[in-house]
Amino acid sequence: MTELAISIITIVLTILLGLCVGSFLNVVIYRLPNGMSLAKPASHCPKCQNPIRWYDNIPVLSYLILGGKCRHCKEKISFRYPFVELLNTAMWFLCLLCFTNFIIPSNPMNWLRFVVSCIVCSTLICIFFCDLDSMEIPEVLFLVLLICGLVLLLDNPSMERLMQKVFGFLGAGLLFYLVNAVYKLIRKRDGIGFGDIELVACAGLIIGGYHMIFALVVSCVLGGIALIIISAIRKEKGKEYPFAVLLCSGIALALFVGDYVVNCYIGLLG
Ligand SMILES: [Zn+2]
C-alpha cells in the first residue's frame, strides 16, 4: 500500500471515529453529572421514551434525515447533539494535522501525541458542556486529563520540557489557588471553583507553562468580552459564571497554535 493510501485511510478513520466518539460524548455530558450509568438504559427519546434505533443514531446523518425531530413523537432534538459530534471530529482532524502533519506512517511519538491530544480534546468538550449546563464537572474528567498529562511526559522528555510541564502544573494550579484565597479573604466566599483549579493544573501539565500563560490570556480576554455582553443584557449581580467554559477554549487554542504563538513571542524577545 502506498503512503498516500495509508494517509487517506487514516484521515477517513479519524473522521468516522471522531463522529462516533462525539456521539458518545453527548451521552457523557448528559449522564455523568447526573450520576447515571453511561451504558444503561440505551438511548431513548426523553419525551415518548421510545428507544432510538441504530439507524436513527448515526452521528449527524440521522439528525439531518429526521429533520431534527424524534421519529415517533416529533419532539425537537437539540442542535447541540450534531454540533458536539462535528466539534469533536473537527478537533480530532486538527490533532491529525498538527501532530502527524498527515505524514503517515511517521515518528511513533507523533502518534502518541496525536492519540493523547484527541483524548484531551474530547475531555475538554465534556468539561465545557458540563460546566455550561450545571457548573458541575465530574472528577473523573480531571483524572483523564491528569493521566494524559503524565503520558505526554514520555514525549521528548528533555529536562527543559519536563521543567516546563512541572512549572505549568504547579504554577497554574498555585496561581488559581492563591487568587481564590485572596478573593475568599476579602469577599468571604470562593471566587474560583476547585474544579477550575484542577483544570488549569492538569492543562499546565499537558501543554506546559508557556502555553498555559497563552491559554490564560485567551481565557481572560474571552471572559472580559463575555462579561461585558452579559452585563449589558442582564442586570443581576453576584451571579456565578461557568469559568471552565472559557478555560477549555483557551486551553484548546493553546494546544493547536501554542507552539506558533510562543515561538513568535520568544522571537520578539530576541
Ligand atoms: Zn419521542
Image (cartoon, rainbow, N blue to C red):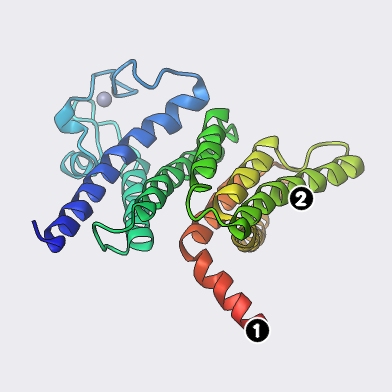
Ligand 1 rendered quadrant: top left
| Residue visible at 49% across and 40% down in the picture | 129
| Residue visible at 84% across and 45% down in the picture | 183
**Which residue is most to the left?**
1
The amino acid at mark 2 is Leu
Task: Name the residue tied to disc 1.
Answer: 270
Q: Is residue 55 left or right of residue 237?
A: left
The amino acid at mark 1 is Gly
Nearest the eye: 166 or 142: 166
Name the image quarter holding the N terminus. bottom left
Residues packed near mark 1 inside 10 Å, few (<14), some (14 to 19) or many (20 plus): few
**Secondary structure type for disc 1:** loop
Name the image quarter holding the C terminus. bottom right
| Residue visible at 53% across and 64% down in the picture | 258
Residue 57 x/y as whole percent: 22, 32
**Which residue is most to the top?**
41
| Residue visible at 15% across and 42% down in the picture | 65
Task: Name the residue tied to disc 2.
Answer: 175
Q: Are marks 1 and 2 in contact (CB under 8 Å)?
A: no
Q: Is residue 7 left or right of residue 255?
A: left
